[in-house]
Amino acid sequence: MGSLKILDISFNQGLSLPRSLGNLCKLQALFLSGLDLSQDTAKSQQIFSGCIVQSLKVLELAETKLQGDIPYWVNSLKNLQWLNLYDNQINSTLPPWLFNLTSISFLDLSYNDFHGSIPSIIENMYLLEAIYLDFNSHLEGPIPMTLGNLCKLQTLSLEGVNISQNFQEFGGIFSGCIKNSLQSLNLGNISLRGAIPKSIGQLSNLAYLGLENNNLEGVLTQDHFANLQKLTTIDLSGNALTGPISSNINGTMSQLVTLSLSMNKINGMVPFTLCTLANTQVLDVSLNYLSGKLPNCWNNNSQFMVLDFSSNNISGGIPNSICSLQKLESLHLSNNSLSDVFPTSLRECHSLITLDLSYNNFFGSIPHWIAESMPNLQVLNLKFNKFSGYLPTQLSSLPKLHILDLSHNNLSGSIPRNFGDFSGMTLSKKMDGLEDFDYIVFSMGYMLLVIKGNEYKCKIILFLLNIMDLSCNNLHGSIPEELTNLSELESLNLSGNHLTGDITNKIGKMRELESLDLSRNNISGIIPPSLESMDFLQRLNLSYNNLSGQIPFEKHFTTFDDPYIYIGNLELCGPPLSINCSRDEVLTTPTSDVQEKDIWLHLGICSGFITGLWAVFIIMLFKRTWRVAYFRYVDNMCDRMYVAILVKFTILKRISRQI
């Protein structure tokens, strides 16, 4: 195929490359990602010594299990423009010869284990447009100032590299010609420290700026971003920035689509100018020290899809204008000092998918109109408030709800039977691809969720979680049998209520359940045997109830060997408790199960005896030596028995004569 220009054989595991590949003299692009090139380096050397070295411009070697150094034959590809070595096991320094490949415009060395530092001769790659060195954790700083001389560089990504440099020094590269070309700058997780240099404002074409999870400090001023008119995404989360949010933020960054200032020390009021960010879709100012009330200035001209004000000191209520944002899908207001009844203004938030009002002081009843007004709701988190009244039965008509957390409130009444009708908790997630879901949301918000008994700060990927938490309320009555219809539920927490009745044996239908907490109730009866068949169950808490009888301790249930799981049930017995079961208590185990086990035991013994007997008989039938040996053994035994009996008889006869 002498005219071949593009060849893509990537991700064919087990495929071996022929040496004749090097004879494709017109090949310009070769995609080998996902192949195993670690086994036969000599063959690779031969392939890339043919005429292919003159024509090749694009070489993809991502995930090819390369180890040690970058293969030296790459040095022979003098016309190479695109080199991708993403996600290999290369653990050398950056070789100087690599930077003599002056034709390269795209270089991806991320997710390897390069060490040392970036050499100053990187400026030799004067045609370089994009370089990725992400997550080479042993690659160290300082960054060479010659990097600023790459006049065509559009993308610089160093995330996860151990630069550990003062940002003011690093900012020296922005005075070079790079300031006119750079469009994407990713410096997250590289241990940058100090204040953000004002020279960053010289990057007039910058569209993406990632500075998350560093040690940056100081106050953000208008001067930092005055000239960044093309900036669409800025991530400054996970630093120690202080001061208020600039009141002129709309004038300096009018094209912003994503703004993340979370996990800093920003204080002051929430400025009204945030409402005027016409193009912003994601606004995240969580985990700061913002105070006062939320401004009531939101309007339908804005594009906001995610608003996250969680974990601040914001007080008051939810502004009436918030639902003027017709595209709003995710609203996070948790862990503030908000206090109000459930706001009726939310009735107009028809596009909401995530609503998190947890850890506040909201009170009153949970309105029944939530299901009607928010038909796309997937996450409803109202825990740690002061809501009272009954659980609205209408909630079960939310067809897409995956997470329902109403824990730690003052809710009363019984659990509605139709809470087993949440269709979103019955849909299987075991599909071939994400395209099978028509309502997956990757929200930028974070949420505190109790999973397997521990509280985690989760970045929500909704389709992975199915959770129902009604714990720590004043609910009474029995556990509805209909809850067992939630076949895809992974976590069920009903602890800390006043529930009574038995645990239905149908609970075994909940095959996906990983965490079950029914502790601190008044539940009675035996522990249902069907729990033994729940293979995914990893956390169980039945403590402080009125359960009785013997604890099942077979199959998967043997892993629950912590006695604190069962503490506070005075009539439970058997391992792992130290209380032995009496005969009467043992008889509470269904006799049909015992009889069935005995029958199978007897059948096994009989079948084993018959099988063994016939095995010996068949062998003797066809093997003469075995037959002779067997009958000789029998004859000897008979002779010995005859002699023994005769001797005994003679002795007894003599004794009788003497008497």
Image (tube, rainbow, N blue to C red):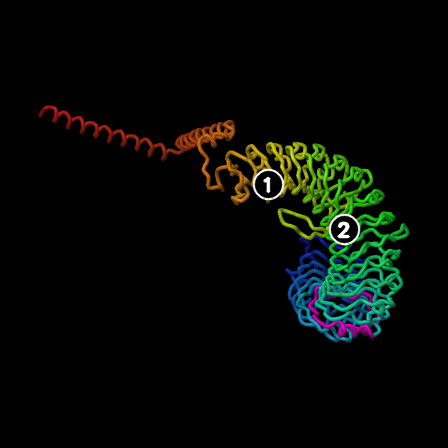
Q: Residue at x 76, y 73 (%)?
A: 168
Task: Give the x, y percent position of residue 59.
Answer: 76, 62
Of the pair 341 and 432, the residue shown nearer to us? 341
Residue 485, image quadrant: top right
Task: Give the x, y percent position of residue 645.
Answer: 21, 27
| Mark toward the start of the polypeptide (1 vs 2) | 2
Query: Which numbered disc covers residue 520?
Result: 1
Residue of label 2? 338
Which residue of the protein is positioned furthest toward the right in this rendering? 301
Secondary structure state at the residue bearing disc 2: strand
Task: Tell me: residue 417, above or below residue 295.
Answer: above
The crowd level at tag 2 (other Cα within 10 Å; few <14, some 14-19, many 20+) is: many
Secondary structure state at the residue bearing disc 1: loop
Q: Residue at x 75, y 37 (%)?
A: 395
Task: Give the x, y percent position of residue 422.
Answer: 73, 37
Say which quadrant the C terminus sits in: top left
Q: Is residue 469 left or right of residue 611?
A: right
Mark 1 vs mark 2, CA separation in Å: 30 Å
The crowd level at tag 1 (other Cα within 10 Å; few <14, some 14-19, many 20+) is: many
Q: Is residue 534 magenta?
A: no
